[in-house]
Amino acid sequence: MADKLDPHHLVALMSYLFRGREDGSSSRYLDLTFVNPGNGITNNRETSIRTFPILDAIANICVFKKGSQPVAVALQLKPKELEIRLTIAEDQEVEPLVVNHLNSVWEKLQALSDGFAAQRGSDNNQEGSPDISEDVALPLRVKIFREIYEFSMQKQMAQGRKWFEGLVKFAKKLSESRAIPLQEVESDLYDVVVAMDSVLELVDKFRHYPTQGLTYDEWETVYDL
């Protein structure tokens, strides 16, 4: 990355590439063969390509406004110095609360990484990523989920209301039209709708009574669903 790069150029580029896709998830469909990693980021092409969905996810958790809020995130990696630099850009000045939120989540992710490392133990000969038990660092994972969800509550609720009512109607019609119980992907879809209905019911409680909030058990239920 050039030293004099205007970070707002990142927003313009992302807007051009991802126009028409509100959640920015279109990056997964891009042909990444044209990318030529360089500028000191890393000389490992595979590693660079794998960072794209991670940056997508980081950009998404920075979005909290109900309306349009384009966010782009770039990464610089110095392997020898063990340093990572994230650059956040919007179509206006980035608010301090966004930076504070990302710092807070990043610190918890570091703690989560330490918890996973402790679970893996000293076996460095295992190929690939080892399986992690579902109960490892569960309270911390729920805490990270809760922090992200509370920060982006307005956006989440706006998106949910935009499509969920139609999805419920579709799932009900689908179930009624089948002479036999739903199977495979149709059954999975129906389960998702039921789970989301429970999630929205709990989240509505938090939205209407923010000072009271949800209990840990309720947040764990939302996380599980």
Image (cartoon, rainbow, N blue to C red):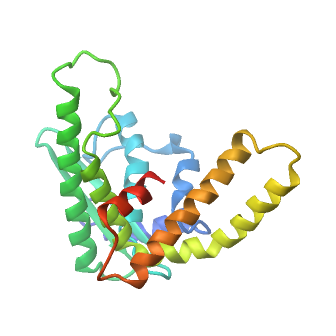
Report how many numbered discs are placed on residues in the image.
0
Residue occupying image coordinates x 21% and y 19%: 124
Relative side of 207 to 114, left or right: right
Q: Where does the image place residue 119, in percent across and percent down from the top left? A: 21, 31
Which is more toward the observer, 101 or 167?
A: 167
Residue 159 placement (x, y as % from top left): 55, 72
Asked whether 54 or 80 is in front, the reply is 54
- Horizontal and vertical percent position of residue 40: 24, 46
What residue is drawn where x is 38% and y is 63%? Answer: 218
> Relative to residue 14, is residue 138 drawn left or right?
left
Q: Position of residue 9 (x, y in %)?
A: 39, 70
Left or right? Give the position of 65 relative to 141: right
Q: Is residue 128 above or below residue 184?
A: above
Q: Report whether residue 184 is seen.
A: yes
Q: Is residue 63 above or below residue 35?
A: below
Residue displayed at 38% across by 50% down:
54
Quadrant in the rendering for residue 99: bottom left
Quarter of the figure that contains the N terminus = bottom left
Whether 173 is drawn above or below 65: the answer is: above
